[in-house]
Amino acid sequence: MAAGLASFVVIANRLPVDRVFNPDGSTTWRTSPGGLVSALEPVMRRKGGAWIGWHGAPDERLRPFEHDGIRLVPVRLSTQDVIDYYEGFSNATLWPLYHDVVAPPQFHREWWDAYVSVNQRFAKAAARVAKRGATVWVQDYQLQLVPAMLRELRPDLQIGFFLHIPFPPTELFQQLPWRRQILEGLIGADLVGFQLPGAAQNFTRLVRDRVGHKTQRGTVSLPDGRTVVARAFPISIDAKSFEELARSTEVETRAAEIRSSLGSPKTVLLGIDRLDYTKGLYRRLRAFGELIREGSLSVEDAVFVQVATPSRERVDQYRLLREDVDRLVGGINADVGRIGSQPITYLHASYPREEMAALYRAADVMVVTPLRDGMNLVAKEYVACRYDDRGALVLSEFAGAAAELKQAYQVNPYDINGMKATILEAVRAPERESSRRMRSMRRTVLDHDIDAWAQSFISALSQR
Ligand code: GDG
């Protein structure tokens, strides 16, 4: 590869690596776990790819470097950029707005200004490293202005964009003071990908109504003759590698250990989420607490393990949520716990992949109840780990995954009584019934894995 020039470029808010500080004072980089990196790695290697993103430390300028055969191009963010562009506009304006306004979005003009200038910085970095005619794939809500900015700088490029979170209906999107600029940013791409067809429809409708371009089904026609395609590409996981991990002796042993340290209850229920208000932790735990309190589940027989991975801890809404969940769990355990049996084991921590797989193996009922979620990979990971066809998945209708995992025990997370009834149904399901459901979900997840997802996006982009 000619120095600095790449024929396949990924742009994401974060580089796919974390810095490791060694005891001897030196630092190295470790590939961060995640399906996206592993799915794109082969393409990156084959095509001489580059990944552009922030390296995670504010106020530090780093030179491009190579890690595991991939060229990484760090983008600098100042402390103020982190506050305004990342914590502010991305996570306190767009995140709640795109998730059905489940928390009130905040609109601040200085956050918007920072979003524009950081997006410009990413676009310029891409314009510098992309070879003539290269393919560039922009990821997610933090970078929605990049496609148009990049096209302006480099009209020779083929540009794709994928949104990992939902795209809201017109009625909600309209609130955004900068709605038109965001839409114009996105239509800089040749292909705009969403998790679900409904999101693609919301987008094309908004482009027609707000920007005034002609649209026909998923295609937008611009006055200069260019067209933009909007389509759904539901993301998935590296299902085979999860299953392999789940089958390992270490994971099986650890799963047995987890169950016995919980007091070997009849039923282990599990929730694993970033501690985020969109994930519906509060209502889910309330539903479980009521089931125990009313005696529908007994404290000796059922234990709920809730892993809440720390997330965005400097954003106010996240701090409030943490307090609320802490208080709720404390209250339930104090009210209905007994010596030696706590109904909820609440872990505010993040774990290695092996421990996650062991938890999935240890759980009889996985409870995934977001109020709104682009896809939800945890649901798919649970299914991938259940190679014995056992276990039940309770899944919110409002997770993107519900469109594919039709055999899950689906719930409306706003309906606490409905959720209680469905959790009970899942707990009590005869083994034949839950295996039938699990088998069908496993086929879906194993057939549509992350490689299939990346391939289908890249091939649709190359046909544009
Ligand atoms: C966004 C969208 C969409 C969690 N805790 C630990 C850990 N995790 C891993 C899970 C899973 C991932 O993080 C979470 O993915 P989700 O899909 O559940 O949620 P978001 O982070 O909100 O992701 C979402 C996704 O993008 C992809 O497009 O599905 O809708 O919101 O893989 O396993 N991993 C480890 N330790 C933890 O403690 N190792």
Image (cartoon, rainbow, N blue to C red):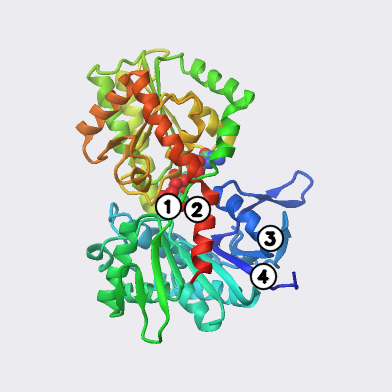
What x and y, as percent, mark residue 429? Answer: 32, 21
Quarter of the image holding residue 74?
bottom right
Does the rendering let one see residue 72? no
Give the residue pinned by disc 4.
Answer: 6
N-terminal of the pair, mark 3 or mark 1, is: 3
Q: Nearer the viewer, mark 3 or mark 4?
A: 3
Any atom of ligand 1 within 8 Å of the CB at mark 2?
no
Q: Position of residue 447 (x, y in %)?
A: 49, 43
Q: How far apart are the two marked residues, 3 and 1, measured between alpha carbons?
A: 24 Å
Instruction: Give the alpha-carbon distance from disc 4 to disc 1, as whole Å.
Output: 27 Å
Disc 2, disc 3: CB below 8 Å? no
> Label 2, label 4: how many angstroms apart (C-alpha)?
22 Å
- Decide which of tag 2 and tag 4 comes sooner along the chain: 4
- Amino acid carrying label 3: it is Arg
Of residues 352 and 458, which is closer to you in this image?
Answer: 458
- In percent of width and height, residue 135 lies at 58, 70
Badge 4, how many Cα within 10 Å: few under 14, some, many 20+?
many
Disc 4 residue type (three-letter): Ala
Label located before the other in sequence (1 or 2): 1
Q: Nearer the viewer, residue 348 or 259?
A: 259
Labelled pair 1, 2 in contact (Cβ < 8 Å): yes
Task: Say whether disc 3 or disc 4 marks the residue closer to the N-terminus.
Answer: 4
Q: Amino acid at mark 1?
A: Pro
Q: Give the class, few, some or many, for how many residues have Cα within 10 Å of label 2's Cα (few <14, many ≥20).
A: some
Q: Which residue is mark 2?
A: 453
**Which residue is label 3 attached to?**
46
* Label number found at residue 234: 1
Q: As rendered, which of 201 and 427 lies closer to the eye? A: 201
Please tell me whether mark 1 sits on a helix, a strand or a loop: loop
Residue at image position (36%, 25%) is 434
The number of numbered discs placed on residues in the rendered structure image is 4
- Report how far apart the C-alphas of labels 3 and 4 lie in the structure: 11 Å
